[in-house]
Image (cartoon, rainbow, N blue to C red):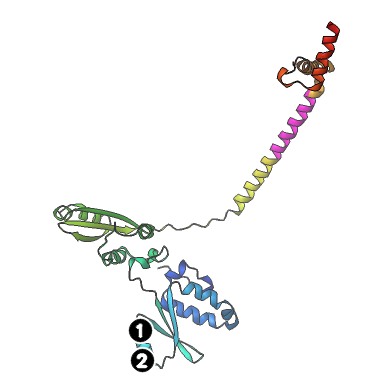
Amino acid sequence: MKQKTKMSLDDLNKSNVWTVTPGELSQMIIDAKKKRDEFVENEKHYMNIIKTVFDIQYLKREDSARVNQLENTGYEVFSTTDENGNNAIAIRKHPIKKVTDLTLENVQHLEPWEVLDLISRNMGTGWKGLPLAIQDIIESAFFVDCTIMPANMMRREGGIIDRRKEDGYEVLEIERGTWIEGIFMKLKPKVEKVHIDYSIDDEEDGRKKRRKHRDEDEDDYDDDIDMEEEEEDMDDEELKRLDGEDDEEIDDEEPDENNLQIEDIDAIDDIADEEE
C-alpha cells in the first residue's frame, strides 16, 4: 500500500485541504508552531485556507465540560503545547447538511449516496427541481440520470433500476403519486494530471522557431533584392513609356462643364475673341 506523503501547512491550498483529516491538520499546526516566527507571519494565510473546510477552536484540555460539548457537536479534540493558557485544539470539517452547501471543491470528496441523501432531504424537489447551478456542481463530479415513469415499470425485474445498478449507479427513488422519479448517480473517473518536463522539447522547439524566423527574414530580404534588380533591369525607354502613358491619361481629361474653375472661364473668353 502506497504511504501518504506527509504534508505541511505550506503545502495546503483550497483544493487539497479537503483531503486532510482533522488529526492530520492538528499535527500540521503543531509542527508549524515549532517555527514560531514563520507561523505568526503566515498564520492569516494558513487560516484563510483552513477555514474554507474546517472549524477550529482552542481550549483547555482540563475543561471537561467544554471538551464534551465540542465533541457532541462533531469536533475532534487534540492535545497541543500550552499557549495562551490553552493546551488543546478542537477541529471539525464543515458539515454538509443541505444541497446548497455543495461547492465545486467539496462535491469532489463525496460519495454518490451522500449527494443522493442531500437531494432526498431537499423538500421533495427531486433532481429537476434543483437550481441549475447546483445541478452543474453535482455533474462536475458525477454522472447523473433522472427518469420519471409509473412505479410498476420503474421497479419491474430487469428494468431501468436493475440496469443502472449493474452499471454502477446509486439509486434514489422519489414517489410522485403512482409514478416514481428515479435519480441515478455514479462517480466520474478522476483524471490524474500528468506533469511532464518539457524543458528539452521546449529548447528544441525554440531553436526550430528561431530557424524558421531566420529563414523567413532571409526570404523577405531576397524578395526585396529581386524587386530592386527588376527595377534596375527596366531600360530608360520603358520608364519613359510608362511616364508618357500617365501624361496622356492626364491630358485626355476634359473639364467638367458643371464645375468650371476661373482659369477655364478665361480660356473660353479667349477662344471667343479669336473667333470674332
Q: Nearer the viewer, residue 188 or 84?
A: 84
Residue 101, can we see it? yes
Amino acid tagged 1: Glu
> Which numbered dot is residue 256?
none
Q: Is residue 218 magenta?
A: yes
Q: Quadrant of the N terminus?
A: bottom left
- Using the numbered discs, state the Cα–Cα distance from disc 1 to disc 2 in whole angstroms: 10 Å
Residue 134: horizontal and vertical position, in percent? 36, 60
The answer, for residue 7, to whether it is visible in the render is no
Q: Extreme bottom residue here?
A: 62
103 left or right of 198 in image: left
Q: Which residue is drawn at the image coordinates 43% and 57% (left, top)?
A: 191
Q: Residue flagged by tag 2: what amino acid is it?
A: Ala
Where residue 176 sits, quadrant-wise, is bottom left
How packed is label 1: few (under 14 Cα within 10 Å), some, or many (20 or more)?
some
The residue closer to the viewer here, 168 or 102, is 102
Q: Which residue is mark 2?
A: 65
Q: Which residues are magenta?
A: 214-230
Q: Position of residue 10 (x, y in %)?
A: 54, 73
